[in-house]
Image (cartoon, rainbow, N blue to C red):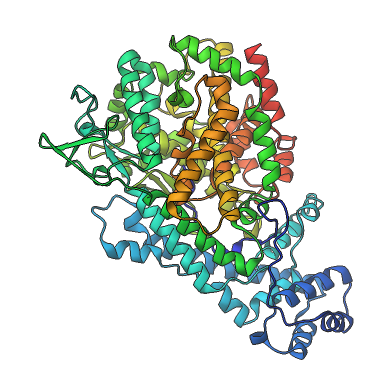
Amino acid sequence: MKTGLYTLTILAAMTTFFAAGCKQNTARQTTIDEATIRGAVEQITATDRDVMERGVRQVARLWRAEDGTAQDFREFCAANYIDDPEVRRATFERISFYLEGIVGYNNRMTLRLRWNTDLDTGPLLPVDAQFAAYSPGAHFTDDFYRNKIAFIIALNFPQLSLAEKEMLGDNRLAWAYARLGDLFTERIPAEAKQRAAEAGSAANVYISDYNIYMGRLCTDDGRQIFPDDMRLLSHWNLRDEIKSNYALGDAGLEKQRMTYRVMQRIIDQTIPAAVVNSADYDWNPFTNAVTRNGVPVTLAAEGAVRYAKMLDNFRAAREIDRHTGTTLIDRKFDEEMEIDVDTVEQLFDRYLSAPELRVVGALIAQRLGRPLEAHDIWYDGFKMRSTLDEDKLSQMTLRLFPTAEAFERAMPSMLVTLGFAPVRAKEIASLIAVDAARGSGHAWGAQMRGQRSHLRTRLTPQGMDYKGFNIAVHELGHNVEQTISLYDVDYWTLRRVPNTSFTEALAFIFQRKDLELLGIGDGGPSAEAAAMEMLDMAWGLFEICGVSMLDIAVWKWLYANPNVTAEQLRDQTILLSKQIWNHYFAPVFGVEDQTVLAVYSHMISNPLYLSNYAFGRIIEFQLDRHLSGRDFANEVDRIYRLGKLTPNAWMMRATGSPVSVEPFIAALREVVD
């Protein structure tokens, strides 16, 4: 479940690293030459001339003809460079105060504009999507360059490299300055940002309303095997349905195979378009035959609609690329994750290639009493909940949480159960609102102190079933992080975490405590329970690393083939999913050419986000090992006050070790041995 945090484009530092591994040489429109830069540097008196020159050069790179002449540039630098450290700090604090208000209220406006597309408020109207696509912050950077505030920030708080940031040690003010320096590093026109917002919104609306009416699915012999009122969102609920059926034996296997066939139809787009989000037809996903009131009908397939949405996101990203000299791959990894894509792929490859995974696969096949099938990528039998009747769990959660408000009222007691003191639990919970989501669950963080974060989860007409509760607990982990890392950090520019993987890590830890929050014990001897938990985490990481590798591979292919059609993108995505499956998964599963890795909806509505889940699982493991035996609530409070350091700097201060997959593999090896 992704975080629904709205972040202005200006809050991203635009570093350059071409998707294929080399820098993209996109010429920028600067009008300031080297002689002018040297002249500006020479006329400024500065205690730290290196910092001053870095700021001058950053302003020069951003300066355009409409900003003034070369003489205007020199005069601006001389008049606005701040050498006095006390004045610099006072200026930093004043800028932070203003930016918190601007970003906070823009976040609040976007929350309102997307209210009906994100929440289950009834049928969508065309105007809802139009308002959701509007970006109130689209002109923010243009305005700040026009009024020269952006240049003042760039001049006095220039951007630092990743290596330079990691040399800052425990100097919190220097870290805060560095994060302010990440704000104004490129100039992206408002029109380009607005097009990206529109493409993203259209993809999100498409995904948010992509439901399958499972009660209208039928077998080859005409049987209905799912409840009449079951409506599942792709891919989240379909995946969770597969997981929930491991407790049902052969009856569960029939449901899993049908659900997986639905997924395959969605991926290859042979699914009849009219059966999506509709209860008007009976559909056999194996034969693709459709009937209405018992009469066979012919319906057009989706074709390539899914991939057209992805392609629209790519084209919008390419428009931004023209102004940054980077690709979306660069911005997602080098900038947002602060880890280059090659390093991420190497880390995932190291794990996916671990021989211990074959042992885990063999163990699962033994437990199932049959050869593995592709849908067993979501095997859920290592969890205690897999032996429990999900219908009974749902009866419990529906009784406890008939509405979103009921879950909101219960949050303080849940946090107390997790170890937070009653006063602290009430304080955190009071800063989180709970909403019924139209699509999958997500957490939308506040950006300004005084505002609440929003927890979104899916509710049925009867209330929150177990699937919805499980998602809600995950989102609660996000919201706890969002609250601590906004309200309890020392500087606003250091709010949040290094990247979304770090908030996903806490969300995963919360999610695994969902049964504990229902008053259900952890089950079994502690040593056995720990071994089962390790196997469950290992299998989950196996799946999400593969999905993440596909997400990256598709975008690298798009950048190498920018003029493709939606149909060509569909075919290539399917081909790449089979290739990655055959390389990493076929040796474990014993079956080739599966497309399951391509089912994730994030690839359509939130491109290149999936690596945060995989990276988050690795961080989750390290955090979980650190938290084990310690005061959970106090450590969570301490760790998430660290704020937005770089990934390794954060992890060293949180756990004493850098980010690495090796401890995970070593722990898995202990279990399988």
Where residue 438 appears, x then y in whole percent? 32, 48
Q: Please give left or right for residue 564 compared with residue 173 in the image.
A: left
Quarter of the view holding residue 239: top left
Question: As rendered, which of 348 and 594 lies closer to the eye?
Answer: 594
Measuring from the top left, give residue 659's x and y in whole percent: 71, 37
Please state, as top left, top right, bottom left or bottom right, where the C terminus lies in the image.
top right
Residue depicted at x 72% and y 58%:
23
Left or right, residue 534 beside residue 381: right
Viewer-proximal residue among 120 and 589: 589
Q: Is residue 59 above or below residue 255?
A: below
Q: In this orientation, does residue 100 appear? A: no
What's the residue at 44%, 12% (across, down)?
368
Residue 453 percent across, percent down from the top left: 46, 52
Q: x and y percent of residue 79 in the render? A: 77, 85
Q: What residue is drawn where x is 56% and y is 29%? A: 582
Query: In the picture, residue 17 is in which quadrant?
Result: bottom right
Q: Determine whether, in the image, residue 670 is placed left or right of residue 564.
A: right
Q: Is residue 663 above or below residue 130?
A: above
Q: Residue at x 65, y 29 (%)?
A: 351
| Residue 145 visible | yes
Considering depth in this image, is 382 or 283 the residue closer to the camera? 283
How many marks are shown on the rendered structure?
Answer: 0
Above or below 648: residue 101: below
